[in-house]
Amino acid sequence: MTMSQKWRVIRRLFAINCASTMAYRFEFIIWMAGSIVTPIVGLAIWRATAASGATLPVSATYLTTYFVMSSLFALATSSWHGEWMPSMIREGKLSIWLMRPGSVYFEIIANNLAEKVIKLVVLLPMVGIFGWFFRDDLAVPGGVLRWTLTIISLLLGAIMFFSLRALVGTIGFWMEETRSINVAIGLLEGILLGGIIPLALFPEWSQGFVAAQVFRFRFAFSLDVLLADLSTAELIQGFAWQLAWTAGMVAASVWLWNRGRAVFSAVGG
């Protein structure tokens, strides 16, 4: 298939997924309401900590803007196919795509984009209300260069996390159940993602590890590119780590997928 044919297929699948996603719009409202609770709780905790007299290494403006923007950045880089790919493999549904000229990843990418569009429509008003309540300490920076670097970082983070989820999902070729792996990754994300505890607030002795670990580069680094006054050296180092993690995840997921597809035997096949 040519590149134009591939994108034509993805666009059609995107439209189909948008229509099917709308059937669950009330569930999406609940999910998005739940997703914004985490930054609200995180901001409340750290504002209370600062009000009690604790000295934080970041300003109130940084904290407020970080948490208000974090749910949008988290949505932009989110992926969930690692949770249902093993069932596709186990139940033999993958064989349908293996007999087609296109890849199953056309469907996965289309589903990912369609759900993000619908979720964004639901999430934006919630973020707007959240930001309005804390508008006195909210300051979203401008500048073409800053936003360009932020968008590039977000795209890299989305590709990296998509590949990580694909890597976990592909393990389903050899394991019937990968839920424990997803749970373990979820626990690590809860600590190292920066969703409740901004990574800038981690102890000084841990900053070397925190600055290089993979979960930072899903969206925490992108937020720092936008909100923190990173030096040129810090930007170069951060993007170098993000590029390395992204390239590594893509290469590993492609390699494992090809290995798994070679040994795949559909149920009843």
Image (tube, rainbow, N blue to C red):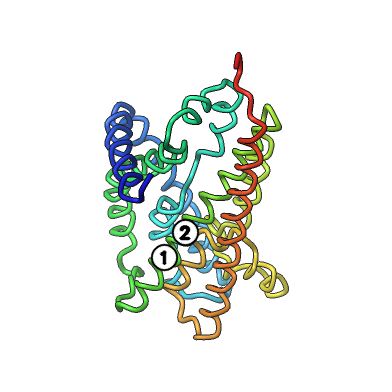
Image quadrant containing the C terminus: top right
For the residues marked 1 and 2, what is the alpha-carbon distance in whole angstroms? Answer: 7 Å
- Looking at the picture, does residue 58 appear above or below residue 122? below
- Local crowd size for mark 1, using a 10 Å CA cut-off: few (<14), some (14–19), many (≥20): many
Residue 130, position as x, y percentages in the image: 33, 54
Q: How many marks?
A: 2
State the residue in front, 122 or 52: 122
Residue 208 position by quadrant: bottom right
- Looking at the picture, does residue 96 appear above or below residue 5? above
Image quadrant containing the N terminus: top left
Residue 196, position as x, y percentages in the image: 54, 56
Q: Residue furthest right?
A: 205
Residue 43, labelled with which disc?
2
Q: Marks 2 and 1: in contact by CB < 8 Å?
A: yes
- Local crowd size for mark 2, using a 10 Å CA cut-off: few (<14), some (14–19), many (≥20): many
- The residue that label 1 is drawn on is 64
Q: Residue shown at 56%/55% (left/top)?
A: 250
Q: Residue shown at 63%/54% (left/top)?
A: 191
- Looking at the picture, does residue 138 appear above or below residue 97? below
- Report the side of 105 relative to 211 (left or right): left
Residue 267, position as x, y percentages in the image: 61, 17
Mark 1 / mark 2, whichever is N-terminal: 2
Q: Residue furthest top?
A: 268
Amino acid type, label 2 = Leu
State the residue in front, 173 or 45: 173
SS at circle 1: helix
Amino acid type, label 1 = Thr
Residue 235, position as x, y percentages in the image: 51, 79
Q: Residue shown at 31%/28% (left/top)?
A: 20
- Report the side of 147 relative to 97 (left or right): left
